[in-house]
Amino acid sequence: MKIAFFDAKSYDKSSFEAYSSKSGIEFKYFETKLNEDTARLAGGFDGVCVFVNDTVDAAVIDKLYELGVKVIALRCAGFNNVDVKYAKGKLHIVRVPAYSPYAVAEHTIALLLTSIRRIHKAYIRSRDFNFSLSGMTGFDLHGKTVGVIGTGKIGRVFIDICKGFGMKVLAFDKFPAKEIDNGDTVKYCSLDELFEKSDIISLHCPLTEETHHIIDDNAIDKCKKGVVILNTSRGALVDAEALLEGIKSRKVGAACLDVYEEEADLFFEDNSQHIVEDDILARLISMPNVIVTSHQAFLTEEALDNIAETTVENIKMILENGQCPNELCYKGGNTEDCKNGKCF
Ligand code: NAI
């Protein structure tokens, strides 16, 4: 079994090599991303392994199909970059539905604490022996209300952490998990109520047509003054231009972004020697109350190990039996999502 591995990074290689040698799968690592121009590199391979910023649209699917590729293995949970509907009947698509919800939830809370306690400023000041505390006043998380949009695996771990801080949780989900609503410290509510009452809003839902720009100027208008917005899910959940306006008008108190709408050409790479063309990102990064990390919330040893193990198993199942519980399907397949009524 030969798999073309796109957008390969050094940390991917070490985790995947640990499993590939045992499984009989041979990975060829390409640093380039998969797109219409690079799809031809997959000639002679049984499958391709891709990540969040590879392009798997109709044109790429057609090329891979013509080349005889049988499986697209996503080494991530989100699949907004894949035209699943178009791939139906042509290629199998598998993903890693969960690898470490703790990694993402813990990174979210790390960003929140860094931001509201000004740790990013303190780190730089003390390295310069500037021990002044002026401008460093933060606020307690205890007693604050956090709005959580998306109460799946990551959202629930995040909620548990917030409960530990003594925060109140207002939750919104298309498919609410009634068992986590205790009518007191964790309550489901409408999106509007969540916007109106939350001191902090954290996004943990997938990017779909419905959730695209779920945080836009309208949503920001409804929010409390000084709201802190956390996005460790997918960039296009937030209208970056509206967020920038919200920051400039002082309506948004702070923003922590691990993902960004136009991240594909920038994130995961060293752009320190380049002139970054994206004025909105540059302006956001220039703000003292905005923290940006480069889609690194998933990046823990445990998550990398789980991603490699599940991806290798997914590929083996599809190539050996033509079936896998982690297969993505468009209306009517055998995936866990279909069984749970969440087929797309
Ligand atoms: P999950 O599938 O367990 O949970 C997603 C939740 O969102 C579900 O409860 C679902 O019902 C809900 N949802 C779906 N449509 C919705 C809508 N229109 N409005 C409100 N809620 C909706 O997924 P999980 O594992 O918790 O991951 C969540 C997201 O986190 C992923 O979709 C992915 O985009 C992102 N992610 C980011 C990573 C990073 O490194 N920054 C790593 C892994 C995931």
Image: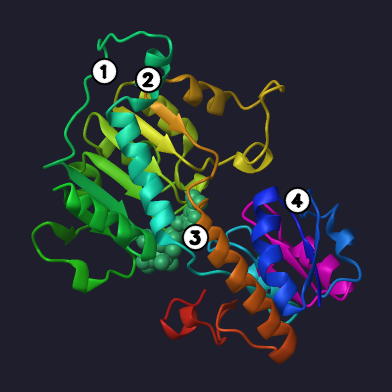
CB at disc 4 and ligand 1 closer than 8 Å: no
- Nearest to N terminus: mark 2 or mark 3: 2
Instruction: State the extent of the magenta-drawn residues as a range.
Output: 47-73
Classify residue 284 as left or right of residue 25: left
Mark 3 crowd level (few <14, some 14–19, many ≥20, 10 Å Cα): few
Q: CA distance from mark 1 to mark 3?
A: 34 Å
Classify residue 62 as left or right of residue 243: right
Residue 79 placement: quadrant: bottom right
Please state which amino acid type lies under the numbered disc 4: Lys
- The residue singled out by tag 3 in the image is 302
SS for tag 1? loop
Residue depth check, mark 1 versus mark 4: number of the one nearer the observer? 1
- The residue singled out by tag 1 in the image is 136
Q: CA distance from mark 2 to mark 3?
A: 29 Å
Contact between marks 2 and 4 (CB within 8 A): the answer is: no
Contact between marks 1 and 2 (CB within 8 A): the answer is: yes
Residue depth check, mark 3 versus mark 4: number of the one nearer the observer? 3
Q: Residue placed farthest to the left in the image?
A: 184
SS for tag 4? loop
- Nearest to N terminus: mark 2 or mark 4: 4
Please state which amino acid type lies under the numbered disc 3: Glu
Instruction: Out of 155 and 242, give the one closest to the viewer.
Output: 155
Is 200 included in the stretch rendered in magenta?
no
Position of 222 relative to 205 (above/below) = above
Instruction: Out of 295 and 174, give the one closest to the viewer.
Output: 295
Q: On the rendered image, what quadrant is the N terminus found in?
A: bottom right
- The residue singled out by tag 2 in the image is 121
Q: Residue 142, how many percent across, how many down?
A: 14, 41
- Nearest to N terminus: mark 1 or mark 4: 4
- Nearest to N terminus: mark 1 or mark 2: 2
Residue at the (25%, 45%) spot, across then down: 195
